[in-house]
Image (tube, rainbow, N blue to C red):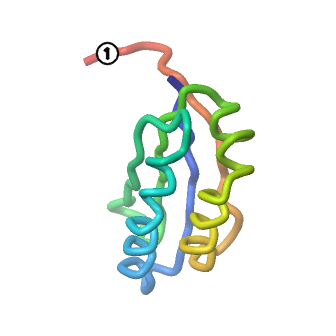
Amino acid sequence: MIKEIARIDIDPAQAADFEAAVAQAQPHFRAAPGCRSFALERAVDRPGHYLLVVGWDSVDAHMVDFRASDGFQAWRALAGLFFKATPEVFHIETAIDGF
């Protein structure tokens, strides 16, 4: 499994509305083939800074399959209006599984 990390910056005054929009988008990820997990992490010391962390079977499950889906369009319609800039998106895999 790989994880998609999307660094998202929003206006801190819109945090509650943004989090509600992301919660509404969760079913679109859950329904996506190859999607294994979904979480939104909020920075404690940087108001308005978030990490969307989504587990996928592969990069293609995210970048090809999901990005071409109606679910992706729904995600962007719900959350995209809050983005200060296009999110920085990259993929990670575990190199060392510590404790």
Q: Position of residue 89 (x, y in %)?
A: 65, 47
Indicate the secondary structure of the residue bearing disc 1: loop
Residue at 48 percent across and 35 percent down: it is 55
The furthest residue to the bottom: 13
In the picture, measured across the screen, residue 38 lies left or right of residue 76, that is left
Q: Position of residue 26 (x, y in %)?
A: 43, 58
In the picture, measured across the screen, residue 99 lies left or right of residue 20, that is left
Q: Where is 99 relative to 4, above or below?
A: above
Q: Position of residue 70 (x, y in %)?
A: 66, 59
Q: Position of residue 40 (x, y in %)?
A: 40, 55
Residue at 61 percent across and 26 percent down: it is 58
**Quadrant into which the C terminus falls:** top left
Quarter of the rendering containing residue 74: bottom right
Report the amino acid beneath label 1. Answer: Gly
Quarter of the rendering containing residue 47: bottom left
What is the crowding at mark 1: few (fewer than 14 residues within 10 Å), some, or many (at least 20)?
few
Q: Nearer the viewer, residue 30 or 45?
A: 30
Q: Where is 86 relative to 81, above or below?
A: above
Q: How many marks?
A: 1
Residue at 37 percent across and 60 percent down: it is 42
Q: Where is 86 relative to 13, above or below?
A: above
Q: Nearer the viewer, residue 14 or 44?
A: 14
In the picture of the structure, the residue carrying the numbered disc 1 is: 98
Residue at 61 percent across and 34 percent down: it is 91
Q: Nearer the viewer, residue 35 or 47?
A: 35
